[in-house]
Image: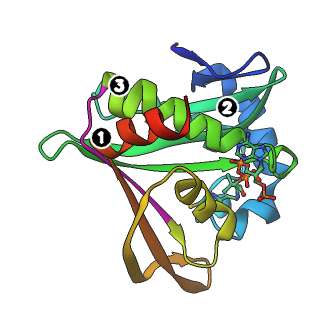
């Protein structure tokens, strides 16, 4: 399984079947907090459900459609991030992510997104464009692409159904050339 170092205390590791127990525990103990913005909590009731998701991400990887990584911090799983698929014809993809509530507020996800973009999206996969979508009211999620210099493309109205209501999505994008520019001007 591929590992991408982030700092002395943190790294990304491709999700693997043996992560199911820890990932389910993180999900289950953050259920109410995650449910505010993510649509899959009610379909994730047992460790077998999480194992099924991990197997789906492994199949995705085996089909050359990108994949999902766990974010490991001080030896524990803190969250995950991954692309939905890779559009090889148009060389674009979209990224989703979540952290356990106890791991928020330290820049962990921002750093994970940077590493994922450098190593995978604009690295191994050579994509031209990455999009991140977040509910317009989800300020913490929107802050990540904003912090990293993504451009706001617009708002998709009533774009996702979250249990009992629809939310609008803000769509952010980053082009390969913009990322190279941002990396050299802001992060070196
Ligand atoms: C979206 C989510 C991942 C954001 O988590 P987060 O902790 O705010 O994001 P980061 O880990 O990048 O940390 C950024 C925070 O750490 C602070 N920080 C500290 N050191 C930092 C550093 N070196 N770099 C960047 N930020 C740093 C930032 O100021 C910010 O804090 P603030 O919100 O008080 O301003 C998290 O809220 C979450 O999982 N929510 C539930 C699921 C969800 O909404 N998923 C997204 C669906 S689109």
Drawn side of residue 39 relative to residue 150, left or right? right
Q: CA distance from mark 1 to mark 2?
A: 24 Å
Among the 4 quarters of the image, the one containing residue 80: top right
**Res. 176 mark:** 1
Q: Which residue is mark 2?
A: 71
Q: Check disc 3: other Cα within 10 Å, few if <14, some if 14-19, many if 20+.
A: few
Pinpoint residue 174: horizontal percent, then vertical percent. 36, 51
Q: Earlier in the sequence, mark 2 or mark 3?
A: 2
Q: Which residue is mark 3?
A: 123
**Scheme of image coloration:** rainbow
In the image, is the residue at mark 2 within 8 Å of ligand 1 by its beta carbon? Answer: no
| Magenta segment includes 3 | no
Q: Are marks 1 and 3 in contact (CB under 8 Å)?
A: no
Q: Earlier in the sequence, mark 1 or mark 2?
A: 2
Among the 4 quarters of the image, the one containing residue 106: top right
Q: Is there any visible trace of residue 60 in the rendered image?
A: no
Residue extent of the magenta highlight: 125-133
Secondary structure type for disc 3 = helix
Q: Of tags 1 and 3, which is closer to the observer?
A: 1
Q: Check disc 2: other Cα within 10 Å, few if <14, some if 14-19, many if 20+.
A: many
Pinpoint residue 123: horizontal percent, then vertical percent. 35, 25
**Res. 18 mark:** none
């Amino acid at each position: 399984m591929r590992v991408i170092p982030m700092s002395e205390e943190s790294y990304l590791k491709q999700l693997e079947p043996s992560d199911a127990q820890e990932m389910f525990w993180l999900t289950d103990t953050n259920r109410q907090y995650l449910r505010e913005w993510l649509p899959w909590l009610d379909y994730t009731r047992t460790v077998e459900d999480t194992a099924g998701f991990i197997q789906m991400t492994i199949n995705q990887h085996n089909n050359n459609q990108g994949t999902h990584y766990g974010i490991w911090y001080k030896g524990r799983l803190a969250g995950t991030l991954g692309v939905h698929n890779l559009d090889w014809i148009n060389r674009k993809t979209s990224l989703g992510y979540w952290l356990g509530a106890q791991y928020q507020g330290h820049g962990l996800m921002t750093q994970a997104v940077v590493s994922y973009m450098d190593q995978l999206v604009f690295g191994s996969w050579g994509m031209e464009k990455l999009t991140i979508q977040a509910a317009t009211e989800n300020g913490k999620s929107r802050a990540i692409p904003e912090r990293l210099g993504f451009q706001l493309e617009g708002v998709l109205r009533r774009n996702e159904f979250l249990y009992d209501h629809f939310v609008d999505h803000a769509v952010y994008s980053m082009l390969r050339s913009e990322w190279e520019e941002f990396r050299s001007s802001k992060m070196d």
